[in-house]
Image (cartoon, rainbow, N blue to C red):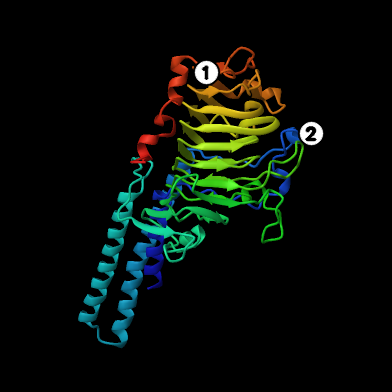
């Protein structure tokens, strides 16, 4: 029986290992020294943010270990049959065999294995492998309602609705959040995938909290930038519509240290955002890793307010600066030429106050492109910053393509940025940039 259970759990682990998206461990316990300093800090060039790569080469390791698990499974299965035979032989010495009982046991074992295979086939039809197209569409789905009024909803907080889901969620769950200001810190764990959050308009449904990198957490340590997020998603296939995510901490004074205040962090693959607002100051939107799609969203901040190492497409979005003096729109964290990451802004607007860089090279291979984008007269003529490291001038990829507005002139841009040709711009202009045809369905 012990071997049978071991075999069953090994099968379960093997299936999940092959079919679930790559899960990256949390970095919430990284030392505070890893937290990025303010743009105007005299130390920011010597401080590096923690990196976690999202690379397709990791799937090769997954397949290798899956083969090892298959071999182990075969060995255990063989031993199980042999061991059962030995037990039956010993029973012959002491008691008369019971053919009826043996038949019943074999039938139960067979039925258990058949039920397991049905489950494997069902889940396999929902998830994708390295060789199949991912389909972000699950049935059956069900709906939960969150309302400030307990008489009109299933829950009064979003976190309570999340907590009500099973530990491993495999069906689409739509959480409808009624109008109101929800003062709470929300976290969606890694295994609770396929969650949708739908508000009643970004101006009407707001989730807000006010932590910073220096806020002391439950363990007595500073939260760090990673842990400061008002709303954090760690599971794949997340969707948000018509809702605002806000960090209420006010814009810090120039040179302030430890005042990173994330409104939203996405640390998972295949997430989409439609009609959402992300409000904050320094480090508003932490696009940590994974493929993401932002459609008709509004993102507000001061310094590096869109940052991370994701592979993300921003389409029809407004990027609004509230910088008092010097600021930066992006800080993309690509650290290797092998990283398939970067930010692409298509048909967007860059507006607001202050004087802005379009991007700073947080990663030595940072990659950002603006195409068909209107730029207000707030963009520094040189456009881009190498984070004080001239070596990055040869490795970053910063480009513009057919942008317009008083801040869009390519004259004066740093020599190591690009004014893209049609062929150079093409990979950045559509959902193909994020493999969107594989997982973006009916948004």
State yes or no: discs 2 and 1 in contact (Cβ < 8 Å).
no
Image coordinates for residue 393, horizontal then vertical, percent: 65, 21
Q: Earlier in the sequence, mark 2 or mark 1?
A: 2
Q: CA distance from mark 2 to mark 1?
A: 34 Å
Residue 203 seen in this snapshot: yes
Residue 366 seen in this snapshot: no
- Disc assigned to residue 404: 1
Front-most of 80 and 247?
247
Front-most of 365 and 69?
365
Residue of label 2: 42
**Quarter location, residue 177:** bottom left
Image coordinates for residue 30, horizontal then vertical, percent: 67, 49
- Which residue appears farthest toward the top when viewing the image? 411
Disc 2: CA contacts within 10 A as few (<14), some (14-19) or many (>=20): few
Front-most of 187 and 386?
187
Element type at mark 1: loop
- Decide if residue 424 is on the left or right side of residue 279: left
- Quadrant of the image containing the N terminus: bottom left
- Which residue appears farthest toward the right when viewing the image? 42
Given this view, does label 2 or label 1 mark the residue nearer the observer? 1
Image coordinates for residue 331, horizontal then vertical, percent: 62, 33
Front-most of 69 and 39?
39
- Decide if residue 437 is on the left or right side of residue 373: left
Residue at left offset 47%, top offset 39%: 292
- Decide if residue 376 is on the left or right side of residue 344: right
């Amino acid at each position: 029986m012990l071997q049978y259970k071991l075999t069953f759990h090994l099968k379960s682990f093997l299936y999940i290992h092959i079919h679930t998206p790559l899960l990256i461990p949390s970095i919430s316990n990284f030392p505070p020294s890893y937290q990025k300093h303010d743009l105007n800090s005299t130390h920011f060039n010597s401080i590096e943010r923690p990196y976690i790569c999202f690379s397709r080469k990791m799937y090769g390791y997954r397949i290798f270990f899956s083969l090892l698990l298959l071999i182990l499974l075969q060995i255990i299965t063989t031993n199980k049959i042999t061991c059962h035979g030995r037990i039956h032989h010993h029973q012959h010495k002491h008691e008369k065999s019971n053919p009826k009982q043996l038949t019943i046991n074999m039938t139960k074992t067979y039925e258990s294995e058949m039920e397991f295979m049905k489950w494997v086939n069902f889940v396999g039809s929902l998830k994708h492998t390295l060789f199949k197209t991912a389909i972000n569409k699950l049935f059956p789905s069900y709906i939960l309602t969150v309302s400030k009024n307990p008489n009109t909803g299933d829950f009064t907080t979003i976190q309570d609705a999340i907590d009500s889901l099973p530990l491993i969620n495999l069906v689409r769950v739509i959480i409808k959040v009624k109008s109101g200001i929800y003062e709470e810190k929300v976290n969606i764990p890694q295994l609770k995938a396929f969650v949708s959050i739908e508000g009643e308009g970004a101006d009407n449904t707001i989730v807000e909290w006010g932590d910073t990198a220096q806020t002391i957490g439950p363990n007595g340590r500073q939260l760090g930038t990673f842990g400061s997020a008002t709303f954090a998603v760690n599971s794949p296939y997340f969707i948000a519509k018509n809702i605002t995510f806000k960090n209420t901490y006010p814009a810090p004074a120039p040179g302030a240290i430890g005042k990173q205040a994330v409104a939203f962090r996405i640390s998972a693959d295949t997430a989409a955002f439609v009609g959402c607002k992300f409000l904050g100051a320094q480090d508003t939107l932490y696009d940590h890793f994974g493929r993401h799609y932002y459609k008709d969203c509004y993102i507000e901040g001061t310094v590096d307010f869109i940052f991370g190492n994701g592979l993300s497409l921003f389409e029809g979005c407004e990027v609004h600066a509230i910088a008092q003096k010097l600021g930066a729109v992006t800080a993309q964290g690509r650290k290797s030429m092998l990283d398939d990451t970067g930010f692409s802004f298509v048909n967007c607007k860059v507006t607001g106050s202050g004087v802005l860089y379009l991007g700073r090279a947080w990663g030595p291979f940072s990659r950002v492109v603006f195409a068909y984008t209107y730029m207000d007269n707030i963009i520094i003529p040189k456009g881009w910053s190498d984070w004080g490291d001239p070596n990055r001038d040869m490795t970053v990829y910063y480009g513009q393509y057919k942008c317009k507005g008083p801040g869009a002139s390519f004259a004066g841009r740093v020599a190591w940025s690009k004014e893209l040709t049609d062929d150079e711009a093409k990979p950045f202009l559509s959902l193909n940039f994020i493999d969107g045809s594989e997982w973006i369905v009916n948004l």
